[in-house]
Amino acid sequence: MRGANILIALTFLGCDDGGGPAGAADAEVVSRPPRGGSHWTLGDAIAVGGAGLHADLAQGPDGVLGVAWFDDTPRAEGPCSEVGDPPPDKVRWTVRFAALRGGAWTSEQVAQPILLGTPLGLSLAFEPDGAPAIATMTGEPLALQRYCGANDAGLLVRAGEEDWRLETVATSSATAPAGDAASDFGEVVGPWSALAIGDDGDAVLAYKDVHSGAIQGDDLTRADVAVALRAGGTWTHEVIDFGRGAGDFNAVAIDAEGRAIVAWHNPVEAPSDSRRGLWVARREADGWKTVRLYEGPSADGPDVAVHPDTGELLVAYYVGVEGRPYLAHLAAGGDLADPHAWTLEVLGDVAYDEGYHPRIAVDPAGKVALVWSRCARRNDGLGNCDPNDDAVIFAWFDPTADRWKTEVIDAGDAARCGTFPDLAFTADGAARVTYQCSRRSGDAFEQRLDTATRTPL
């Protein structure tokens, strides 16, 4: 993998779509089928009927693949009497988990948290003993604040079939004290929870702290990104960035030295001291070091990975003003806080708005790969997703050819396909991809969580 410590190295990478620019000459197009292709096998859906919202794929220490997601339709339960009169309705969203065992996916219900609005992410990881753990918002309504929704950062751990135990990790802004009265006030934490667990059981759980949950006008603009660190079975809590709106789309990893790495997007464009953009932080002996890799808005979040062989830090993200995915590299031993220590590559096809929800994985031979979602042709306008042009895109770096190669895994038909893609490699080098897709069912369409498998690279 190229890791020269230069500021920017732009590699334009194209998919030949039969019309429009295909990118630079050093990018090789492998396939552009309407669905699948010679390398890919599209499997049966993991779940059918409103499935796949915020789907997150992970692999356990025993090689078992698991995926967690929200159903995309909530259930109104009735009056939320806990918060007084007149009560709002309780609205529950269902969290599910599926595992691939014996060649078949089996799914089960995990929890039904009460949420205000649509869910703000979940994150799946596996404990060293193979138990899946899901980080998301949990907790009961807050009577004092008339807040009828989940308000804690919680961990749901599978103890057995259909048996999930809740561990509450953070309950309030003061759980991770910043030493600032405004930032330490409030009870609503846990949006955009992101979880990583090391082989030794140490863990990092990053989340957004929104204080009073937007009940006060400045709760979102002064939000914090906080982190819970588990070592030896005990959680400690720290704030990385407070009082300036941080914590959207959190992503986390743990490097070979046991250091926590957190990436997030800050959406706040302040009149002075603007913090908007993509940030990355790493916990080092003298505290957290941070860097901003991208200044600007984003419609989706980053992913973070550490190369298991080289120790290189990899950060994938979507640049909304360009409609392109980027991959940032920091060589092992590099100074994370120095922007000049990073190498940036811009990927994707210039003919499309693509790169939403990028996810990184490394195969057993050390090859780096990504998946992302394609939205529409660029000339139709950024963000105007079109089912005639959307797709799930797979890209991988071929070290023998010294270039990126891309493939279209699946493409839309008459409804949106390819949202929330994720990627993992099995021990034999096969790529496994999950993604949400709307498929025709009679005269209507239904949201499904679909899967695809690739032959080894």
Image (cartoon, helix red, strand yellow):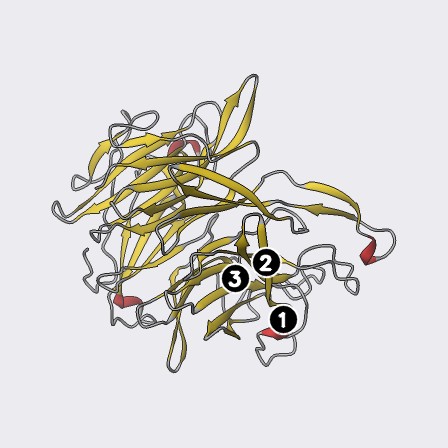
* In the foreground, 164 or 269: 164
* In the foreground, 115 or 389: 115
Q: How far apart are marks 2 and 3 (CA)?
A: 26 Å
Q: Which numbered disc, 3 or 1, marks the residue that appears first in the sequence?
A: 1
Quadrant (top left, top right, bottom left, bottom right) of the C terminus: top left
Quadrant (top left, top right, bottom left, bottom right) of the N terminus: bottom left
Mark 1, secondary structure of its residue: helix
Residue 137 figure quarter: bottom right
Mark 3, secondary structure of its residue: loop
Q: Distance between the residues labelled 3 and 1?
A: 13 Å
Decide: is 301 above or below 457.
below
Residue type at mark 2 is: Arg
Furthest-left residue in this view: 400
Q: Which numbered disc, 2 or 1, marks the residue that appears first in the sequence?
A: 2
Mark 2, secondary structure of its residue: strand
Please report the residue visible at 28 percent of the width from the left and 35 percent of the height from the top: 407
> Which residue carries the number 1 mark?
173
Residue 241: x and y in percent read 50, 71
Q: Which numbered disc, 2 or 3, marks the residue that appears first in the sequence?
A: 2
> Which residue carries the number 3 mark?
247
Q: Distance between the residues labelled 2 and 1?
A: 23 Å
Residue 127: x and y in percent read 44, 61
Point out which mark residue 106 bears: none
Please report the residue visible at 49 percent of the width from the left and 26 percent of the height from the top: 439
Please indicate whether residue 214 sits to the left or right of residue 455 in the image: right
> Which residue carries the number 2 mark?
165
